[in-house]
Image: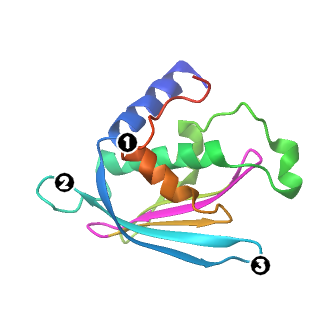
Amino acid sequence: MNENDQQAGLRLLEQAVVVEFVVLRSEVFAGPDGGEFGLRLELQFVRDDEDALPSDDSGALGFLFAIGVLSFADARPRGASEMHYQEQDEFGVGDFLNCLSHSVGGHLRFDADYVRGRRLKTRIVVSPNGPVVIDTQGRGKSAEHWLARLQGGQRLRPIGE
């Protein structure tokens, strides 16, 4: 990753750690095969005045990037993806942008399936002035741990530090 990408990534992470949110709901659901399950978390971004944080606010982008970084760091290969997997790898701004989309309805969406051999299976939808929904598949309850880290449960640091 070049220095400009690292600086951009660090700025997004700085934005992420100041975004306040509350978890509204957590639901475990059956996965595509018997040994896996999915997890859906619904949360709300908040400000001091308790208004929802709009999806086009830079804090939402930072939040999405941080979840992408944490999801990538925890992800491992599955099946044929192992040939593309490298233990020492980082989720960069380019990876983030490849997973990001914006819908006509104003929803900001992060959708990561496999990234360089890592099975992320992480989807996040930020609704304008509404809930944020995080869906993971076959990742256990990792998403709950990612949110805890963002809320100060464990310090975020660049991979390899």
Q: Is residue 64 above or below residue 137?
A: above
Label 1, residues with CA under 10 Å away: few <14, some 14-19, many ≥20:
few
In the displayed structure, 130 sits above or below 18; it is: below
Which stretch did the figure color magenta? 114-130
Dominant SS in magenta: strand
Q: Residue at x 57, y 56 (%)?
A: 142
Describe the element under mark 2 as helix, strand or loop. Answer: loop
Disc 3: which residue = 34
| Quarter in which the N terminus is drawn | top right
- Coordinates of residue 144 in the picture (x, y in percent): 49, 58
Q: Quadrant of residue 69?
A: top right
Inspect the image, locate mark 3, and give the three-letter code of the amino acid beneath it.
Gly
- The answer to which quarter of the image holds residue 35 is bottom right
Residue that extends furthest to the left in the rendered view of this protein = 49
Cα distance, mark 1 to mark 2? Answer: 17 Å
Real-space Cα separation, disc 3 to disc 1, in angstroms: 34 Å
User: From this viewpoint, which residue is outermost toward the top?
Assistant: 3
